[in-house]
Image: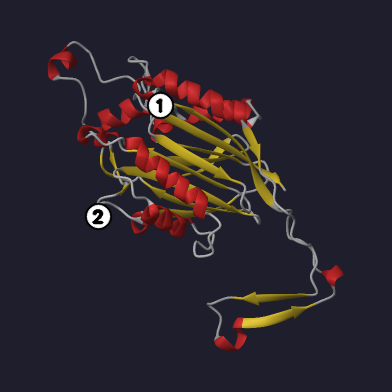
Amino acid sequence: MAIPMTRMMVPQARPSLRLSHTNLPNSTRNFLCLCAPSEIQPLRPELSLSVGTHAIPHPDKVEKGGEDAFFVSSYRGGVMAVADGVSGWAEQDVDPSLFSKELMANASRLVDDEDVRYDPGFLIDKAHTATTSRGSATIILAMLEEVGILKIGNVGDCGLKLLREGQIIFATTPQEHYFDCPYQLSSEGSAQTYLDASFSIVEVQKGDVIVMGSDGLFDNVFDHEIVSIVTKHADVAESSRLLAEVASSHSRDTEFESPYALEARAKGFDVPLWKKALGKKLTGGKLDDVTVIVAKVVSS
């Protein structure tokens, strides 16, 4: 379902504007810009996000809804996050979905906390600290400032791509210890924290499209497929659904030359030598939960 996000407009004119910058000398750090209300003009219209989401669980995890979790908030310019529960915990009789779901519930609850300061790092930290379930998860979180600044925090291999006029102009980079072992927040003290996150700040403009998702999307769908679907389908709910369905379909196709299979072979993972002698190679998608968020930058 598409979730239009609108924010209250800040008044366009004020009798005075106080500016502050910590890098200025003390004598000039604070100053008052006085002018008549009619002289203050907005630099640009305020921006927010119109969001569509779609999730398809791993075929073997449909009953419990998969191990991914996400949230979308209309707070300020808009906040989006995806967490992917690490499935290895199932070997210890721990439900991997509990950690990711609680992590996202905490992030959603704390998004307007004054101590968070509308900062991805602080929000990841506070949400992680508040999570008591046993387990671990990767996470990506994006917060839009109304002036058009997108702030991104990422731990692990969930991802985000920014599209403008049919081109990917920015993409996050996965964080891995080694192939198929991503950085992750955990209930165990030896894992990563927000201090290990990768942070990015990107300027966006009206009409830009943000595609965010768990690795179930990006392991199974190539960039050109993402661009094709997003540019052909302006409705964010429709494009998120189509991306998720394509990812899920590719993940079940054992002959598909997926991004995951190509990376595995590049890292030295392949079929046994006797199969190679028969001309075989490692192919196929990666069966996984698929979570997709598509957001269009719009004027508030």
For image coordinates 40% across by 26% down, the residue present is 220
Q: Where does residue 160 sit, x and y in percent of width and height?
A: 48, 41
Q: Which mark is residue 189?
A: 2
Image vertical order of residue 219 relative to residue 101, above or below: above
**Residue 24 relative to residue 140: left or right:** right
Q: Report which residue position mark 1 lands on.
A: 220
The answer to whether any part of residue 135 appears in the image is yes
Local packing at callout 2 (Cα closer than 10 Å; few below 14, some 14-19, many 20+) is few
Amino acid residing under circle 1: Asn
Asked if 247 appears above or below 127 in the picture, the reply is: above
Residue 174 in view in this figure: no
Label 1, label 2: how far apart the Cα atoms are: 32 Å
**Sequence order check, earlier mark of 1 and 2:** 2
Residue 262: where, in percent of width, then height?
A: 32, 27
As shown in the figure, which amino acid type bears the numbered disc 2? Gly
Residue at 73% across / 54% down in the picture? 8
* Foreground of the two, 126 or 163: 126
Task: Count how many numbered circles sit on residues in the image.
Answer: 2
From the viewer's perspective, tell me whether residue 180 is left or right of residue 172. left
Q: Give the class, few, some or many, for how many residues have Cα within 10 Å of label 1's Cα (few <14, many ≥20).
A: many
Q: Which residue is outermost to the bottom?
A: 27
The one nearer the camera, 255 or 126, is: 126
Left or right, 100 with respect to 228, comes to left
- Circle 2: element type: loop
Contact, mark 1 vs mark 2 (Cβ under 8 Å): no
1 or 2: mark nearer the eye: 2
- Image position, residue 128 (x, y; %): 38, 53
Front residue of 131/200: it is: 131
Q: Residue furthest left?
A: 274
* Label 1 residue SS: loop
Q: Position of residue 5 (x, y in %)?
A: 66, 44
Q: Which mark is residue 123?
A: none
